[in-house]
Image: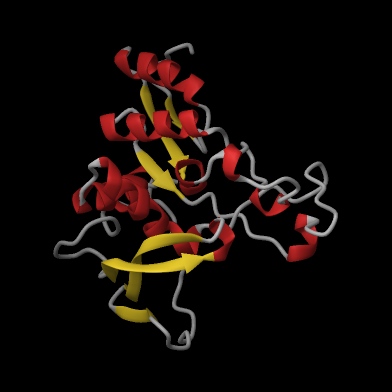
Amino acid sequence: MTCIKAVRCHIVHLSAAEALPLVHAAKQQGALLTAETCHHYLTLAAEEVPNSATQYKCCPPVRGQPNRELLWKALYEGELDMVVSDHSPCTPDLKKLEQGDFLSAWGGISSLQFGLSLFWTEARLRGFTFLDVTRLLSSAPAKLCGLQDRKGCLKQGMDADLVIWDPLRSFQVTPYLGKTLYGVVIRTIVRGNTVYKHDKPFPRPRGKLLISPQL
């Protein structure tokens, strides 16, 4: 990896642990570099995915359990800077579930709605704290997108974006091999408005386009 210190670079969807030494070397040379991985690479392992289960096809692909543990190690040691959803949903027919055809199936996983629980379920077993959760899932992505003046933390003048959750409460989720996840979201608040309450209908959408002032 050639280090050009004047060029900002972000590596998306890092799934292969073989790339980690290159990321480390570039950072040591002073590169303006950040790198992310995704919830499915930290949660799933190729050995666990059933044959012809195209719902788990994504790009890059899910890799083996030893690779997964190396990603967790890199995240704990700060070599990886954040965890993102790579949210890529599709209709069931695009996944070719009945045919089990990995070559023609849509390559993407729907993870946004489970992100906090997916991360916390595994992270709590590996020494991560609540502060690590907020940094890796919230403040670091906000800073990367140039939105740190209004998103990513709680202080005066920032958007009142909050999640109220129970880290000890568990539930099962079918899309992730029927795993039991920990961390049930009770309420989500965006800019001071409740947009989700557990077991309640969704209110009208309140999202808006976010554009970095750097653009």
The quarter of the displayed image where residue 64 is located: top right
Q: Which of 111/55 is in front?
A: 55
The percent position of residue 165, horizontal first and vertical second, equals: 28, 70
| Horizontal side, residue 204 vs residue 94: left or right | left
Identify whether 67 is placed above or below 138: above
Q: Which of 155/87 is in front?
A: 87
For image coordinates 51% across by 47% down, the residue present is: 40
| Horizontal side, residue 14 vs residue 197: left or right | right
The percent position of residue 5, horizontal first and vertical second, equals: 37, 17
The scheme the figure's colours follow is: secondary structure
The percent position of residue 50, horizontal first and vertical second, equals: 67, 47
Q: Is residue 58 visible?
A: yes
Q: Is residue 209 visible?
A: no
The percent position of residue 187, horizontal first and vertical second, equals: 32, 77
For image coordinates 45% across by 72% down, the residue present is: 207
For image coordinates 44% across by 16% down, the residue present is: 22
The quarter of the displayed image where residue 140 is located: top left
| Horizontal side, residue 14 vs residue 26: left or right | right
Q: Which of 174/114 is in front?
A: 174
Identify whether 46 is placed above or below 131: above
For image coordinates 43% across by 22% down, the residue present is: 20
| Horizontal side, residue 13 vs residue 101: left or right | left
